[in-house]
Amino acid sequence: MAEPTIKNGEEHFYPIIYEGTGGGQRIGTFVPFTDNATIANSCMFDAASNVSLTRTPSGASNRKTFTVSVWVKRCVLTDASGNNTYGQRIFNAGASGSAFFDIKWSGSGDTEGANRLHIREYSSSAEQIEYWTNRTFEDTSKWYHILLQVDTTQSTSTDRIKLYVDGDQITSWYRSNAPSQDFDTLVNSTVLHNIGRFTGATSNNLSGYLTEFNLVDGSIVAPSTFGLTDTSTGRWIPKSLTGISYGSNGFRLQFGSPSALGDDTSGNENDFSVSNLVAGDQTTDSPTQNFATFDPLDSGNNAGATPGTAVLAEGNLRVTAPSNPSNWDQYRTSKPLLSGKYYVEVTLTSLNTATYFGVISKNQNIKGGGWYSDQKTGWTYDSTNGKTENSNNGYISYGGARSQGDVVGIAVDLDNGKLWFSENGTYPNSGNPATGANPAYSNLQIAVEDGGLCFTEARGYSGHNDWNFGQRSYTHSAPSGFSTVQQGNMPETAKGVSGLVWTKNRDATDNHQLYDSSRGVKKDLHPNTTDQEGTTTDGLQKFLKGGQQIEDDVSINTSGESYVSWNWVCNGGTTETNNDGETTVTLQKNTTAGFSMGTFTSKVAEQTCGHGLGVKPNFILLKKLDGSQNWMAYHSALSSSDAYYLHLNNTDTTQTGSDFGNDVPTSTVFHTNVTGTAGSSYCFWAWRSVEGYSKFGLYEGNNNADGTFVNTGFKPAFVMIKSIDGSSSSYPWAIYDSKRSPINPVSLFLSANDSVVENTLDRIDFLSNGFKCRQSYSYSNAGETYVYVAFAEHGFVGDGTNPVTAR
């Protein structure tokens, strides 16, 4: 067998299913990245403990020009006690509550809304500086890099305040009010400077982790000094800091000494005083070794949608209940695990009657879905008797009753599907994770298939447990070969950096959402409408290796709703200028996978545009960006002599007009004549067939349950089908994929031209070398003609030696 060009389809195309959280999250696999710098430590700020770092400069310095750079990982977003109703302070300078400078996360009591970044100076009974981002920030699984540049000497008002998050400048503001020229801020004056709290208050404190906190006095420093984009993953990562002149009141806090967390390492010795911070508040969680924590937005109980009494504390590593919850409140960790071996410890710090904890799949419902270990993808340990349970099969004798202060270890081997619990370092039943012997359970693989494995705790009594995913030293040694739960220990993925992302809510009638790295983040289109391009501030934020980073826009991240994301890899966002046609195209291409995308400006008459594929494209989507217009979908199987096309956003039949110029594309250009008006902005996405990876063809349905077989030459991961003649031509573009339907029949489909929820009317089978219709239905197998678009999970010949198997 000949070795295929693309052995693994996931290198260039991959579908993802995920559950919305209502807050920012990383979609897809968490993968390691190549460090440019290592940040060894961070400081944990627990809002309820009223912790802070403070310093009062002995003399004033430059109050007009300075730069603040800090890495922040959020924890509790809304404090149940209400003590951060008006936000959480990251940095504050002021003598009182009536004169202060702030960098904070906004709170639920702010009329502008919670979880925005808010830059403010209030003094002389007026707002001197006021900026509220439109974007909100709820992701507690990641580290945000925040960089603020203040230079009030600038003559242009919009240049006086600049804010960057993860290297990207914030330009979309809910409200903005620039300072007057040459305004003297309170920063670098002789007032109290606070980190993690508001001046003179015991409320509105920070809940989160901070590291590499830098104040540069008297200079504007670019984001590129502190970070860079890792081209292999698309992530913003820290850089080694060199060449910074900190000025007289500048400082650098690295939190390297647990006994001196306020030490300034800039060379200025501008140390901060410590309040209510202890040595244990130093952790190894950092942007370069990002550990798992509990997710405040991924929670519920066995009777309702949200926890009643139990809350998170201590860096989202403690699940605590001041009184007995009415129902069993439950939290789940971020960073679902798909493979590898990991070890975690749970300390029963305050034990009252019972606590239950263990592991659970990412996609299992915990919002009123019943007791989690009653489900097939939930495994629990009972501290009252050491028994375990899974899939409502009854409690099984395993260990013994636990006492306050005991440490229970959890060892998971996802490569072999095994789970162990240890009790103060001893594994019951002679279990041995290092050798694989005598696990408590051997069926964890089903959790991997349900979104990955997470850790969980359910609390029905007061008290609290403290979890350690490796942020601190373990009480007992991890088994040989088992790792801490941090991003650097998670397996690499063959999946590339997403370039085109197409997302659909499976449970609600939200429009389809299409983003690509040529047009840029937050720029969305709706394939099921004629709408022009829009900007969604809380939409897609980063194109990443194996997925993407999103915020909380309802179309892509509503809590409790399920989504599918189809991802094509292009060229990591790097574009080139293509002049193969009459029109200049800004082009991005992946010639290995036969995919390119470009933007161009229309002319009055027909024009040619270079596509960069080197051979004739088989499928082209074309959309106007700055106005309402149909989606044009050229498909080479419609005609060998003319550029016939379909409309992706509706169900009409084959179009014979001139939108593609009535000329078949060549190996270098395609024709278009879509507007008759010059100066409009357009985008296109073009594909050619690549043997063993993609195919764009035509077949005849047979109107039979033993339906037509279509040989693609590979096991499909994605198939989109559209009828082009007869009565069925009025039926939709039906999309099937291997993630939503992991076994045959593939019965779950979405309609590209419609916002309807996921449906199950039609059925096909995905086979090792194509797909077969299994129902006489108009969407895919009436006695009519259909075109299809297909991308591979694996080529039929596998790696060139072993054929791929059917499902």
Image (spheres, grey):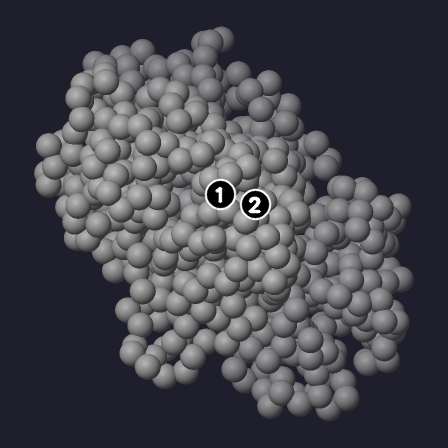
Question: Going 52% across and 53% down the picture, which residue do you hit?
Answer: 701
Residue 210, image x, y percentages:
47, 47
Residue 659, image x, y percentages:
28, 29
Do the residues under discs 1 and 2 have CB atoms within 8 angstroms?
Answer: yes
Q: In which quadrant of the rendered image does the C terminus lie?
A: bottom right
The count of marks equals 2
| Sequence-first disc among 1 and 2 | 1
Q: In which quadrant of the rendered image does the N terminus lie?
A: bottom left
- 10 Å crowding of disc 1: few (<14), some (14-19), many (20+): many
- 10 Å crowding of disc 2: few (<14), some (14-19), many (20+): many
Question: Going 57% across and 34% down the picture, which residue do you hit?
Answer: 755
Q: Nearer the viewer, residue 744 or 339?
A: 744
Question: Going 17% across and 21% down the picture, which residue do you hit?
Answer: 605
Above or below, comparing residue 433 to residue 251 in the picture? below
Q: Nearer the viewer, residue 259 or 11?
A: 11
Q: Nearer the viewer, residue 315 or 280?
A: 315
Q: Nearer the viewer, residue 600 or 237?
A: 600
Residue 235, image x, y percentages:
36, 51
Which image quadrant is residue 555 in?
top right
CA separation in Å, label 1 and label 2: 7 Å
Q: Which residue is mark 1?
A: 723
Can the viewer see residue 436 in this picture? yes
Can the viewer see residue 263 in this picture? no
Q: Which residue is mark 2?
A: 779
Above or below, comparing residue 59 to residue 478 in the picture? above
User: Which residue type does callout 2 highlight?
Assistant: Tyr
Instruction: Name the side, left or right, on which 221 lies relative to 76.
Output: left
Question: Going 55% across and 67% down the picture, which residue do you hit?
Answer: 338
User: Which residue type does callout 1 highlight?
Assistant: Ser
Q: Residue furthest toward the top?
A: 125
Q: Give the SS element for disc 1.
A: strand
